Image (tube, rainbow, N blue to C red):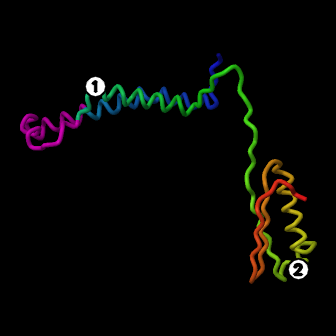
Amino acid sequence: MNSLFVTPSALILLAVLPALWMIIRQARREHDAALVKFGEPKVLAKSSRLPPAAPTRTRTILRWTGLAFAVIALARPQFGRHPAELPKTGRDLIVAIDLSRSMKATDVGMSRLDLAKRMAWQLAATHPGDRVGPTFFTPSILLACRPTAGYG
């Protein structure tokens, strides 16, 4: 079985985790030193009913292991004999076309309606497998058709 990462550049983040761990560890030491300067640790611990803020060793190991696995998941590992191409299921494209009188204007070299129809056909031709649903509207009427792969 081969192991292949779709995004191997995400594995660079694994190198960041030890540096991040060192930064957090140093911040924890400075926090603890500031608490000792502030007051007696035993007295401070009794002043609150909340559990101690310091995470346990097991919790820390689990947290960093989880972060490492999350980074590996970002790299999207692929297992198997060969990558399989999934069939395209297509998308539903809704094309809205205005049928008002202003679409008869020829300020774009042809009527705006003819240009809109031509662009809708080009959109359908450049996205094979997608279903197209035309929606026609005028100032008073809205006619929507279900998306279909039959462009006839």
Q: Is residue 86 above or below residue 119?
A: above
Q: Give the residues drawn in magenta, as a range.
A: 29-53
SS class, disc 2: loop
Q: In the image, what residue occupies the spot 85% across and 62% down? A: 119
SS majority, magenta: helix
The residue where tag 1 is placed is: 57
Q: In the image, what residue occupies the spot 47% across and 28% down? A: 69
- Placement of the C terminus among the 4 image quadrants: bottom right
Residue 45 among magenta residues:
yes
Residue nearer the viewer, 12 or 66: 66
The residue where tag 2 is placed is: 105
Amino acid type, label 2: Ala
Left or right of 61, for residue 114: right
Left or right of 22, for residue 97: right
Q: Is residue 93 above or below residue 85?
A: below
SS class, disc 1: helix
- Placement of the N terminus among the 4 image quadrants: top right
Q: In the image, what residue occupies the spot 57% across and 31% down? A: 75
Amino acid type, label 1: Arg
Left or right of 25, for residue 69: right
Please rate how many residues cluster around mark 1, counting C-alpha atoms within 10 Å: few if below 14, some from 14 to 19, many from 20.
few
